[in-house]
Image (cartoon, rainbow, N blue to C red):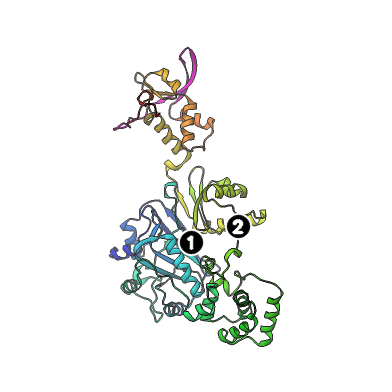
Amino acid sequence: MPDITKFKAIFSGLDIAYGTYIAKGERGDGKQNGQATVVRQPPTDALWERHLAGVEPSLGIIPIRADNSCIWGCIDIDQYPLDHRGLVEKIAGLKLPLVVCRSKSGGAHCFLFVKEPIPAREMQEYLKACAALLGEAGREIFPKQSEILVDRGDTGNFLNLPYFSGDAGTRYAINSDGSAATLDEFYAMYEAAVQTSPLQFPDAPKVAEAAIKDGPPCLQALCSQGFPEGTRNNGLFNIGIYLKQISPSAWEDKLVEYNLKYFTPPLPNNEVQIVIKQLSKKDYRYKCKDAPLNSYCNSGLCRTRKYGIGGHGPDSPTLSSLSKYASEPPLWFLDVDGRRVELETDSLYNQMAFQKACLEKLNTLPPTLKKTDWEQLLNGLLKEMVETEQIAEASEDTSVTGRFMDLLEEFTTHMQQAMDRDELLMGRPWVNTDDGKCYFRIKDLESHLKRNNFVGMTSPKMAQRLRDIGGEPIPLFLKGRTVRCWRIPQFDKQDAPFNTQTVRDVGSPF
């Protein structure tokens, strides 16, 4: 078996779940088609060994840990075909500490490694800045989440690891000459690229930073690297938007100057004059969604710039990374501007319920979209989720029935119990040692469930669950009146009882 020690240390992540992927041919866009699944079990050493040995299914690791930190991240460039050598050279030219590996579909995974765990949000921000400088803005960033709700069944998204089948596989790191790196050569690349905290965020070259001072980072990158053919008119138009803000009285002359200095070849003078005439009509906003700006966009950084998008950016939050946890009923987890929110099916399906959930949990109110736009947005999220099948198997204790049974046991064993059956009227469960049964009023159980935010079961279903474990309703004569109660088989007692005070032990706080 291959030695997994160093490989496992480099790519360690969430230790309570892992991902698997079985390839099933190619899709029409060149990306491999297959089945991806999250397994809610620790990734064992045997799984790491099987991955390096090339035994299906391959192993995927979730980079974000339970404490929302990580030691690696990745820019996933899904482009087919891809010039891997050109990408490596561009990364080297920009002095970015990224290691490029070929993905299973022939794209690229650009890895960033750190020696000590850092917050997942910091990893995301750094990788987004790198992607923007590379002209790859909008690519998937791993970790996809800046936080995960592990206690609610959330796991986040996994990434398929490189070196499936070791040196004989097709998921290898790329040497500077474009050749495939062995696993040992990858280890050397890792040692050369691994970063220490705090991360030093990449900046545009100084010449571009001076040209677009305190302006959009996309324009800084483009002035440095050049505007692609076919985008020069739109590029110059957006530079004009910037120049009108910093030099209201002389922006036309500066636009002519910038055309000659930063465009190769420069636009003809008649085309420059058309751009000037259009800009003179009114004040425009940056065309962030159009080429070439969209490929170099770093909206988070741009919002902090004096002449960036600021308050003129899009108001709608970014929704991404939808995952489904197969509990009963299912739970959904969604990223809203990088913050993880747990949703029930109704609050995902119904836009008003979704807005209410965001207001309650995130203190933000997303704008209302047209019904067709909302449905299109949801379908896009669902399509992405289905493709990755980010669906974890639910354990019994996360189902409605499982949680009900846990709270029932807690109510009948952990709560202060009645000394005699008349104390049932005080809301306490009573255990009859003669028949080994526990008695309680259903309304007292319902109060306990409500205190624990359990609302997933109707009263008839609750009664059926009690019958399923041998319970039955029974009238008891208490304090001169008949009271409707339930009796169920007694749960096993705790080895160490909880220390609870009775009402008689509690003194007046005044």
Question: Residue tagged by mark 1?
Answer: 34
Q: Residue at x 53, y 30 (%)?
A: 459
Residue 447 x/y as whole percent: 48, 31
Magenta stretch: residue 481 in it? yes
Residue 498 x/y as whole percent: 33, 32
Examine the rendered structure and indicate whether residue 155 appears above or below residue 163: above
Q: Quadrant of residue 398?
A: top left
Is residue 267 or residue 153 the one in the foreground?
267
Residue 99 x/y as whole percent: 39, 72
Q: Quadrant of the C terminus?
A: top left
User: In the current view of this chain or complex, which residue is farthest to the top?
Assistant: 480
- Asked whether the viewer can see residue 57, the reply is no
Examine the rendered structure and indicate whether residue 40 appears above or below residue 268: above
Q: Residue at x 40, y 33 (%)?
A: 410
Magenta stretch: residue 260 in it? no
Examine the rendered structure and indicate whether residue 237 appears above or below residue 316: below
Q: Which residues fall within the magenta stretch?
A: 471-498
Is residue 301 or residue 180 the one in the foreground?
301
Q: Quadrant of the N terminus?
A: bottom left
- Asked whether the viewer can see residue 406, the reply is yes
Dot 1 amino acid type: Gly
Question: Residue tagged by mark 2?
Answer: 377
Q: Tell me the element at label 1.
A: strand
Q: Are marks 2 and 1 in contact (CB under 8 Å)?
A: no
Q: Tell me the element at label 2.
A: helix
Is residue 181 or residue 98 the one in the foreground?
98
Residue 69 x/y as whole percent: 39, 58
Dot 2 amino acid type: Leu
Disc 1 crowd rating (10 Å Cα; few below 14, some 14-19, many 20+) is: some
Disc 2 crowd rating (10 Å Cα; few below 14, some 14-19, many 20+) is: some
